[in-house]
Image (spheres, coloured by chain):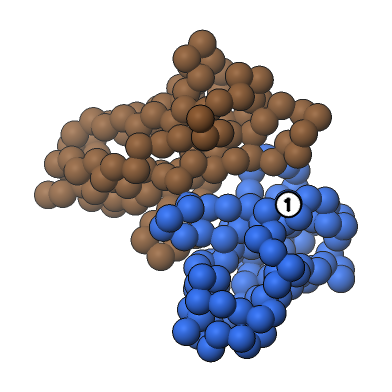
Chain colours: A blue, B brown
Amino acid sequence: DAGVIQSPRHEVTEMGQEVTLRCKPISGHDYLFWYRQTMMRGLELLIYFNNNVPIDDSGMPEDRFSAKMPNASFSTLKIQPSEPRDSAVYFCASSPAKNIQYFGAGTRLSVL
Amino acid sequence: RKEVEQDPGPFNVPEGATVAFNCTYSNSASQSFFWYRQDCRKEPKLLMSVYSSGNEDGRFTAQLNRASQYISLLIRDSKLSDSATYLCAVRPPSGGSYIPTFGRGTSLIVHP
């Protein structure tokens, strides 16, 4: 079992650039979550999907953030345009149900 | 009051010590409770679920106190390798998003 796979592991970009984070959930998991973690705010849920359908995106900070899940094995989180305050670790997690979550290794994003 | 609160620590203890952390939650109807462990620059990983009657896994004991609305994690005979941040997660009652909310974590440092 490969676990949840995220790419890239590190991303350094300049303010104003588009950033795309990718996630491959564990096969058979119906739920996929995107989180952001910072020292100040801890682990924040941005959006989650059930069977590829976005269910709750109330955690998405603003319109610059968007997420898609075109199929059961792939999801993206896009930030356009990126800003320095978006610098954080972004985790993708998947779950067979709405309880125990399995996290990917995360993408460490730095926006200069 | 925040939904889920933890003392950020750090808790600095010698090897072999017993240490306990609490996690308080605001919704008295919360359904499920979990402890996750997060090593430095890694993803959170499930440590253990917390059952109503309390449960133990080796040196780790988790308990739920519904009356006072908190869960606890007790670590006996601390090892250097226990140094990490411990996140609690609390799932609200059904009818809402039913997605666990994470605390910001308690940092544990075990020293020789």
Please tell me whether residue B86 is drawn above or below residue B54 in the rendered image. below
Snapshot quadrant of residue B21: top left
Are there few (<14), some (14-19), or many (20+) residues within 10 Å of tag 1?
few
Q: In this view of the protein, which residue sits in the foreground, B106 or B83?
A: B106
In this view, which residue lies farthest toward the left? Answer: B112
Please tell me whether residue A65 is drawn above or below residue A99 in the rendered image. below
Name the spot of residue B28 as percent of width and height, x first: 60, 19
Name the spot of residue B12 as percent of width and height, x first: 19, 43
Name the spot of residue B71 as percent of width and height, x first: 47, 25
Task: Report the residue at 29% width, 42% height from top.
Answer: B9
Task: Report the residue at 29% width, 50% height from top.
Answer: B83
Task: Report the residue at 47% width, 15% height from top.
Answer: B68
In the displayed structure image, the side of residue B39 where residue B66 appears, left or right? right
In the displayed structure image, the side of residue B110 where residue A104 appears, left or right? right
How many marks the image carries: the answer is 1
Please tell me whether residue B54 is drawn above or below residue B12 in the rendered image. above
Please tell me whether residue B26 is drawn above or below residue B67 in the rendered image. below
Residue under mark 1: which chain is it in? A
Task: Report the residue at 46% width, 35% height from top.
Answer: B5
Residue B65 in sight in this render = yes
Name the amino acid type tagged 1: Ser
Snapshot quadrant of residue A49: bottom right
In the displayed structure image, the side of residue B39 where residue A20 appears, left or right? right
In the displayed structure image, the side of residue A41 where residue B59 appears, left or right? left
Residue at label 1? A58
Q: In this view of the protein, which residue sits in the foreground, B64 or B48?
A: B64
Residue A34 in sight in this render = no
Tell me the element at label 1. Answer: loop
Name the spot of residue B82 as percent of width and height, x first: 31, 47
